[in-house]
Image (cartoon, rainbow, N blue to C red):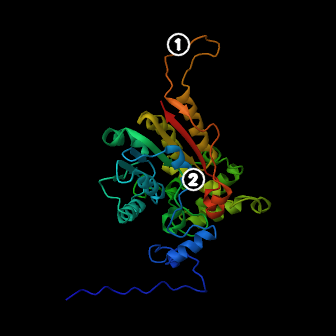
Amino acid sequence: MEEQKEHKRRVRYKGTHPRNYNEKYKELNPEKYQGTIEHVIQKGSTPAGMHIPILVDEILDFLKIEPGQNGLDATLGYGGHSSRMLACLQGKGHLCALDVDPIEMAKTKERLAAQGYGPEILTILHQNFANIDQVAAEYGPFDFILADLGVSSMQIDNPERGFSYKVEGPLDLRLNPDKGISAAERINTISMDELEGMLIENSDEPYAYEIAKTVVEERRKKKIETTKELSDIIKGAIPMKVQSKGGHPAKKTFQAIRIEVNRELEVLSQSLDTMIDHLKPGGRICIITFHSLEDRIVKVKFKENENPCTCPPNFPVCVCGKVSKGKVITRKPIIPSEEEIEVNKRAKSSKLRIFERR
């Protein structure tokens, strides 16, 4: 006798529209409710549980992917960029994709498999691009590499992941929740001076001292365990007249802590040279950044790889022996069009830089 599937009732919520992440059952089932997804995107929002890829057309224009080539998506995420790059391969060649988030990686692997992209053309690895040498030893060298450094929308939107300063959730902020220490562990043990320095270095927070002082005072009374607890503490540390201007007062602090617990800037700085090394001659690497610290690292690293000479400017000829690895394609970063930002507000702060291997 055929086993009957248990019927699941849809999520109930107050009012006419769902407000919380788990109530948005239509957005969380895009295959079933495509009309809802299109409506949400048309309003300039990102559907819950989804991530809209940024600067896709510009990336494809510069990468010029051809059938038979071998590529690397260093930050798989929701798979939006990967699916478009795979389409360019037309069933010939190979794409290797990396992700540190085991939760979203499994969902994306299933999603891409449903689109017809199996192991014959796509390999998905639970790896940080810091391990590019290990990956390239088996799957390189590459005709093209892409790294989208932004946190994916589905990670931000899901309160259980602890990324959002707007909704209650565990204070985690780790891309891989099984590795390293959580944001809560860090924020409850870091010294005031260290915290102030982290906020200045990782997010240029102008009220770093006030926030660090208030965090240390409040954690003496009670351990800080949730996103809302930390967000409320930050609000209490910043003058009200300042809070009425600009974005959310906790935005920069959450960014700084996320960068810290995931070692984002360290990994980026250490990996860029190596990624360029694993490009084939004429191969290109595209990097999408979302804040000035990331963009500065990419800009400097690309420039150093184009002109690595360390000889004094007054030397008539180079004697250091360092050779250029290629050329910077984008002297100024490419930014999204107004039309793209209108459809995807989260694209607003993104910048794209490109380097070509010689």
Toward the bottom, the furthest residue is 1
In the rendered image, is residue 57 in sight? yes
Where residue 319 is drawn, which disc sits there? 1
Is residue 266 in view? Answer: no
Compute the Cα span from label 2 to label 1.
Answer: 41 Å
Question: Which label is found at residue 84?
Answer: none
Q: What residue appears at the point 64 percent right and 45 percent down from the top-left corner?
A: 292
Q: Is residue 127 above or below residue 112?
A: above
Q: Quadrant of the N terminus?
A: bottom left
Residue that protrudes farthest toward the top in the picture: 316
The relative height of residue 323 versus residue 116 in the rendered view (above or below) is above
Q: How many residues crowd mark 2 within 10 Å: few (<14), some (14–19), many (20+)? A: some
Query: Which amino acid, by three-letter code, is at mark 2?
Result: Leu
Q: Which residue is mark 2?
A: 55
Q: Which of the marked residues, 2 or 1, is nearer the chain's N terminus?
A: 2
Rendered location of residue 295, percent (x, y): 60, 43
Residue placed most toward the observer, 158 or 53: 53
Asked if 31 appears above or below 52 in the picture, the reply is below
